[in-house]
Image (tube, rainbow, N blue to C red):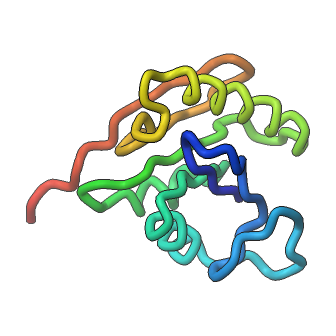
Amino acid sequence: MSIYRPGSRHGVLNDVDSTQPQWHTSGYRRPPDQAIWQYAFDHDFVVVTTNAWDFLHLLNVELHPGLIVLRESGLTRDKQWERLVGAIDDIQRQPDPETYTINQVIEILGLGQILVREIPPPHPH
């Protein structure tokens, strides 16, 4: 589980703990998805995950910083990183990378294969 701030020179934060992201393995048990999502939402980070289903259900807000989903399973960390770097490079090439991911789900289908979908605001009840 990682979080990423588009347009940032600070990179990707890995192995998130719900109160303080760590640049390296924190050694803590991973917090619940809702806590990770809330931290990312509060601090304008994009969540990077292989756990698409749970996080897609958390996009029930009018405006969110975005979600990056690795759709391939069984990849090593190096292979995941290789695919993520390609998606980040694509984001950075956009005219306004800091806002490009807002309300977007960026699905990494394979090496160099990226699908971007807008997740619209929730419907009124």
Q: Residue at x 39, y 31 (%)?
A: 117
Return the residue nearer the eye: 101 or 48: 101
Q: Position of residue 116 (x, y in %)?
A: 45, 28
Q: In terms of image quadrants, where is residue 81?
A: top right
Vertical arrangement, residue 35 with respect to residue 71, above or below: below
Position of residue 7 relative to residue 16, above or below, is: above
89 above or below 78?
above
Q: Position of residue 39 (x, y in %)?
A: 53, 72
From the top left corner, tell me how far across and down residue 102 is, in percent: 38, 44
Q: Residue furthest left?
A: 125
Q: Residue placed at 35% from the left, 44% from the top?
A: 103
> Residue 90, how many percent across, how many down?
59, 23
> What residue is rendered at 70% in x and 25% in y?
86
Residue at 70% of width from left, 50% of height from top?
10
In the image, taking residue 78 as reference, residue 113 lies left or right, namely: left
Q: Is residue 91 above or below residue 20?
A: above
Q: Residue furthest front?
A: 9
* Drawn side of residue 27 relative to residue 60, left or right: right
Name the one closer to the observer, 86 or 23.
23
Task: Please tell me in which quadrant of the rendered image residue 88 appears.
Answer: top right
Q: Quadrant of the C terminus?
A: bottom left
Residue closest to the far top:
112
Q: Quadrant of the N terminus?
A: bottom right
- Asked whether, in this view, residue 117 is left or right of residue 54, the answer is left
- Say how many tags the image has: 0
